[in-house]
Image (spheres, rainbow, N blue to C red):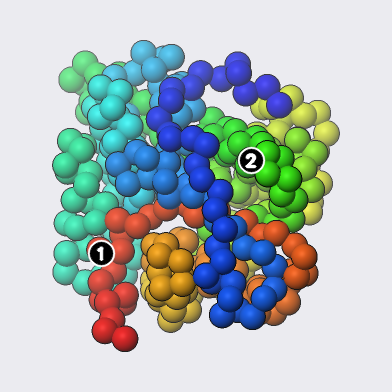
Amino acid sequence: MDLARFPRVRLAHAPTPLEPLDGLRKPLGGGPRLWVKRDDATGLAGGGNKTRKLEYLLGAALAEGADCVVTTGGVQSNHARQTAAAAARLGLACELVLTRVVPDRPPGYETTGNVLLEHLLGARVHIRDGDTDRTAAMDAVADEARAKGAKPYIVPTGGSNRTGALGYARAALELVGQAAERDLRIDHVVHASSSGGTQAGLAAGLHLLGHPARVTGVDVEADAAATEAGVRALASEVASALGSRKPLPEAVVQVLAGHAGPAYGVPTGAMAAAVRRVARTDGLLLDPVYSGKAMAGLIALTEQGAFRDDENVVFLHTGGMPSIFAYGDSLATTT
Ligand SMILES: *Cc1c(COP(=O)(O)O)cnc(C)c1O
């Protein structure tokens, strides 16, 4: 796996910790040993999984001589927040096109959480309707920047293209190294999957390393078939970029349906229960859009007996904590 030929800037605190998740395991009544890989602790202005992707994306941007980065996401995009922070760190201007894709959000949704942090970090925020064509809107913002003499670099939703996904091939290398150091056999990795770069990089990376751990992406888009197709296509691209000449086996990419609720970003009861539960068993904060739904998926799999008692399951915590503040309506509780 030849990662060295791709330009990269250091942004993440890595390796991120790999910690036991024993508090959660007890009330589940035994079952597999649970671990958490703390990619919520990548260290960049609140952390999260996009920081690893941005190491390669902004490495490419700097190599091209860009002085401005343009990206997109939903209003409470963690990717947008991490991009704003990375741009600030590297001295680049940052333009964020945020679309109102989540219906029925309470007052404050467009000013608190990640949006508040983006303003603090000095990004320009452009909020658009939910049906906006993100690519076209980013092109328009980039054209405007070019007209003023800037050299923009465009990063797609979630930083999920071949370049961004390299960050998670690198994370596969890191995780395998951590497991080897402590004689730990990792059997499964579970995490939230949305734009697909995390799972594509991780699954392709583990496969190329010959590691047998199975990766399950929990769909949070409420369209698991589309998520899986996206991950599969991107995983193949990453594998060939890293020098693999054989097609990726089908089984390398598994996306789990049934935990997203009615739509992306819409809270579910199982999500709120999972967020509350892990906060109280392990002092660990998940988020309402991604890691809370992924944890609901992991809890359900464990209760269904999907793992053997002697297996080790790693929950990849992808971050997202700032959006808790935009979801007070569904997470605030006195019980
Ligand atoms: C973006 C994001 C994900 C999903 O990662 P993808 O690479 O887009 O599939 C998961 N969790 C959090 C907190 C995120 O911000």
Q: 274 left or right of 93?
A: right
Instruction: Please state, as top left, top right, bottom left or bottom right, where the N terminus lies in the image.
Output: top right
Query: Residue 235's x, y, as percent?
Result: 66, 41
Query: Residue 241's x, y, as percent?
Result: 67, 27
> What kind of residue is marked 1?
Ala
User: Residue at left 75%, top 35%?
Assistant: 209
Place residue 109 in its image quadrant: bottom left
Q: 311 left or right of 112?
A: right
> What kind of residue is marked 2?
Gln
Q: CA distance from mark 1 to mark 2?
A: 34 Å
| SS state under label 1 | helix
User: Residue at left 21%, top 16%?
Assistant: 149
| SS state under label 2 | helix
* Image marks 1 and 2: residues in contact by CB distance under 8 Å: no
* Residue placed under numbered mark 2 in the picture: 178
Q: Is residue 289 visible?
A: no
Mark 2 crowd level (few <14, some 14–19, many ≥20, 10 Å Cα): some
> Considering only vertical position in the picture, is 174 above or below 219?
above
Q: 232 left or right of 327?
A: right
Query: Residue 216's x, y, as percent?
Result: 66, 58
* Residue placed under numbered mark 1 in the picture: 326
Q: Of 328 and 110, which appears nearest the observer?
A: 328
Q: 317 left or right of 180?
A: left
Q: Of 132 and 186, which appears nearest the observer?
A: 186
Instruction: Please state, as top left, top right, bottom left or bottom right, where the C terminus lies in the image.
Output: bottom left
